[in-house]
Image: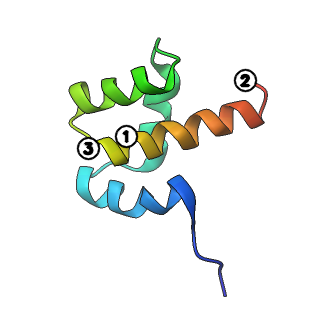
Amino acid sequence: MTAPVNGPASYFPSIEKKYGRPIADWKNLIRSSPLTKHMELVAWLKTEHGLGHGHANALVAHTLAEAKSSGE
């Protein structure tokens, strides 16, 4: 039995369903952005890509945490 997903990743199924793009696409978009600050990236996803605040925040938080843990 798999453990329930907690934290930002818990939003991923609804993000994929609502916006029709895989999470990997969103993460690549975030990584390729010249922006680096959390709230700048959230605002950019909201204004340029139409994401809601919670979804944008979850994607940015998860992507930046991955980058930090991998030493990027």
Number of dots carrying numbers: 3
Q: Is residue 28 above or below residue 2?
A: above
Disc 3 packing (10 Å; few <14; some 14–19; many ≥20) = some
Residue picked out by circle 3: 52
Coloration of the structure image: rainbow
Residue at x 32% of width, y 23% of height? 44
Residue at x 47% of width, y 11% of height? 34
Q: Is residue 40 above or below residue 45?
A: above
Residue picked out by circle 2: 72
Res 25 seen here: no
**Circles 2 and 3: CB distance less than 8 Å?**
no
Residue picked out by circle 1: 56
In what quadrant of the picture does the C terminus appear?
top right
Give the label, 2 or 3, closer to the camera: 3
Q: What's the amino acid at mark 1?
A: Ala
Disc 1 packing (10 Å; few <14; some 14–19; many ≥20) = many
Q: Residues under labels 1 and 3: Cα distance? A: 6 Å
Res 36 seen here: yes
Dot 1: what SS? helix
Dot 3: what SS? loop
Dot 2: what SS? loop
